[in-house]
């Protein structure tokens, strides 16, 4: 046979082997994850840099974070133009702190900026730090997040690809992506939310959680919370998720067996009742008490990690400058409460503040003729606290509703009009906005007249769908985990909305709403995932439960039969006293 006839066959065999390798079920998911991550990383890079650099101008808040890297911006106007280049500068003492308080501004965004600073000379960019390098770092991290989301989504390959593309489209939108080339702390929080969703889906892929899975969710939650103080609202959704299912840990099971042998009374506390003819009521009471004890035991590792998250969050909040709290109180009273008040003097008396300060309504903390110039300012600081402000809004529900309406209007604005998106280059006008991918901007503007129907309806509807998905016993544990994510994200989005309104209030409200906006956008693909989980409940790819051998520990014994606790192979539902691992 001639070489002429051999080469085509050899080429076809090679192609067939390559296609077989790519379509092998054992490799199909890995290949899909890599392709998705790489593709969306490239899309984000193109979206930020092709044509012209797209970012977000500095409003003045960038200094408190970037000065910690010993850099200062090249002299360009703020607000109107993106200022990407920073030269080396040795900041001293209070010159690099939160509002000159002497306390550094804490944020995990600092980590991304450190990588960006190291990458700046590698990319041939000018200065000691160029925020365009930060855009590259964020694009790479975004690609990794997309790959992990693809791996964690408990759906068929094609369905998870569609859903994760929804997450990615929300991130490349003109209302979100420009933050990746900016001096603000939002990028770390935005990316952290993606990793948190992926971590939760990975944690809940089976009927039992694992210590590594809990550690990953804890790390993602703390990264996001430490990015920006207002993200502490994540706790309302993350903590219940971590406690939702029992923990599988062979080492803890072995430790329990060891303790039970050494202290027999400890083992008898959770032992099965002896085979007797007890009446039904007594048996149910004993089983109920035992079930409660076992439920606590098998979630104890998760509870410990939840405690660590709460403790770390409290330390982080305490480490933030008291100056920020002072600013929040001033802006709540003088920028949020008084400007819309028909009787500002009466409101100040209700808050215990001198009514003479009513003349400062509408003036910010930074105004030289604002509240800080008043002789009554120290009295104001000593009198007003968070409790007073919350009590005021509780006593005035009508005005609280008006404040919520202002928040919804800020949400539909999607991006701050007073911050430009482009560098000061020929052909670009001051304060110009990027409209290369402005689907959210256009859609939210159209929905503005229906804001009281659409957005609360979406948040509460997502919560209801999440609860319904949890109660859907025809689903395995992995797809039902999507319900937990919906619950967590909808609760966080609502809490985030009110955290903005009750902290800095009307000050820079559109910019501060970006995390609420992003959480709202993510609910769309999550609802799509919930629909797919229900419609494709017979998908073998979603069967991610892991079997665990029996062990002589209380969380691995069924309620009263002494049999191994099991999860239904069809539903993934946990029986009373179901297995820990």
Image (cartoon, helix red, strand yellow):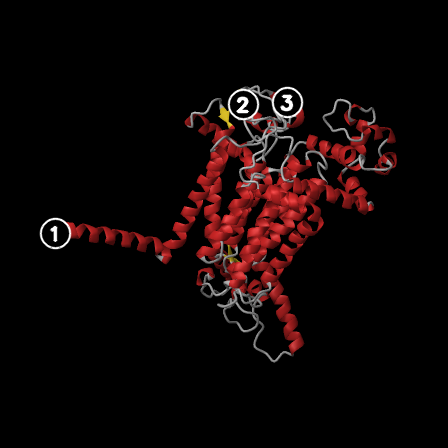
Q: Earlier in the sequence, mark 1 or mark 3?
A: 1
Looking at the image, do the residues carrying marks 2 and 1 touch, with CB atoms under 8 Å apart? no
Image position, residue 75 (x, y; %): 57, 19
| Mark 1, secondary structure of its residue | loop
In front of the other: 336 or 389: 336
Visible residue check, residue 290: yes
Looking at the picture, does residue 152 appear above or below residue 282? above
| Label 2 SS | strand
**Which quadrant would residue 554 be assigned to in this image?**
bottom right
Query: Could you say where residue 541 lies in the image, as x and y percent from the top left?
Result: 44, 60
Among the two numbered marks 2 and 1 on one chain, the one whose residue lies closer to the N terminus: 1
Q: State the residue in front, 405 or 447.
A: 447
Mark 1 to mark 3 CA distance (whole Å): 82 Å
The N terminus: image quadrant: bottom left
Task: Check if mark 1's residue and mark 3's residue have beta carbons within 8 Å.
Answer: no
Mark seen at residue 94: 3
Residue lying at 66% horizontally and 26% vertically, measured from the top left: 99
Label 2 to label 1: alpha-carbon separation: 69 Å
Residue 338: image quadrant is top right
Q: Nearer the viewer, mark 1 or mark 3?
A: 1
Q: Residues within 10 Å of mark 1 (few under 14, many from 20)?
A: few
Q: CA distance from mark 3 to mark 2?
A: 15 Å
Residue designated by label 1 = 2
Please name which of the two marks, 3 or 2, marks the residue nearer to the observer.
2
Percent position of residue 423, x then y? 54, 26
Q: Give the residue displayed 41% in from the left and 27% down from the top.
A: 122
Q: Foreground: 56 or 379?
A: 56
Up the image or down, 108 lies above or below 558; here it is above
Q: Residues within 10 Å of mark 3 (few under 14, many from 20)?
A: few
Q: Is residue 386 left or right of residue 529?
A: right
The residue wearing badge 2 is 71
């Amino acid at each position: 046979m001639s070489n002429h006839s051999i080469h085509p066959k050899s080429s076809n065999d090679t192609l067939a082997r390559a296609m077989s390798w790519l379509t092998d079920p054992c490799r199909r998911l890995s290949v899909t994850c890599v392709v998705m991550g790489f593709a969306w990383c490239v899309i984000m890079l193109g979206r930020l840099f092709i044509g012209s650099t797209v970012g977000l101008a500095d409003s003045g808040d960038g200094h408190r974070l970037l000065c910690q890297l010993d850099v200062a911006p090249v002299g360009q106007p703020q607000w109107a133009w993106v200022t990407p280049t920073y030269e080396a500068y040795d900041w001293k003492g209070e010159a690099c702190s939160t509002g000159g308080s002497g306390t550094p501004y804490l944020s995990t965004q600092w980590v991304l900026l450190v990588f960006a600073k190291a990458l700046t000379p590698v990319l041939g960019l000018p200065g000691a730090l160029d925020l365009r390098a930060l855009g590259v770092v964020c694009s790479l991290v975004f690609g990794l997040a997309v790959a992990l989301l693809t791996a964690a989504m408990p759906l068929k390959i094609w369905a998870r690809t569609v859903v994760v593309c929804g997450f990615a489209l929300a991130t490349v939108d003109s209302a979100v992506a420009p933050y990746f080339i900016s001096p603000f702390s939002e990028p770390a929080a935005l990316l952290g939310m993606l990793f948190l969703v992926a971590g939760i889906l990975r944690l809940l892929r089976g009927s039992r959680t694992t210590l590594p899975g809990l550690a990953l969710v804890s790390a993602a939650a703390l990264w996001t919370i430490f990015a920006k103080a207002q993200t502490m609202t994540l706790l309302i959704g993350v903590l219940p998720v971590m406690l939702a299912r029992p923990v599988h840990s062979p080492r803890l099971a072995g430790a329990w067996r060891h303790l039970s042998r050494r202290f027999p009374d400890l083992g008898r506390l959770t032992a099965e009742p002896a085979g007797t003819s007890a009446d039904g009521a007594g048996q149910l009471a004993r089983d109920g008490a035992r079930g409660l004890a076992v439920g606590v035991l098998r979630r104890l590792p998760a509870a410990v990690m939840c405690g660590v998250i709460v403790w770390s969050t409290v330390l982080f909040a305490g480490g933030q400058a008291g100056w920020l709290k002072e600013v929040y109180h001033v802006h709540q009273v003088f920028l949020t409460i008084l400007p819309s008040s028909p009787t500002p003097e009466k409101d100040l008396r209700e808050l215990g503040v001198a009514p003479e300060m009513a003349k400062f309504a509408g003036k910010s903390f930074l105004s030289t003729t604002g509240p800080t110039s008043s002789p009554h300012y120290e009295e104001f600081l000593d009198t007003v606290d968070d409790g007073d402000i919350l009590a005021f809004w509780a006593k005035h529900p009508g005005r609280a509703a008006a404040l919520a309406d202002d928040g919804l209007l800020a949400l539909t604005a999607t991006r701050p009009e007073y911050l430009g998106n482009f560098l000061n280059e020929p052909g670009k006008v001051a304060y110009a906005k990027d409209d290369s991918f402005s689907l959210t901007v256009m859609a939210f503007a159209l929905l503005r007249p229906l804001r009281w129907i659409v957005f609360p309806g979406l948040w509460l509807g997502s919560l209801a769908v999440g609860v319904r998905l949890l109660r859907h016993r025809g689903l395995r544990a992995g797809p039902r985990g999507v319900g937990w994510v919906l619950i967590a994200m909808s609760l966080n989005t609502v809490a985030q909305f009110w955290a903005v309104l009750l902290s800095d209030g009307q000050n820079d409200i559109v910019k501060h709403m970006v995390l609420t906006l992003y959480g709202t956008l993510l609910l769309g693909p999550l609802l799509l995932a919930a629909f797919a989980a229900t419609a494709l409940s017979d998908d073998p790819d979603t069967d991610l439960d892991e079997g665990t051998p029996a062990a002589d520990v209380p969380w691995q014994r069924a309620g009263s039969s002494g049999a191994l606790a099991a999860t239904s192979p069809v539903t993934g539902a946990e029986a009373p006293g179901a297995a820990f691992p």
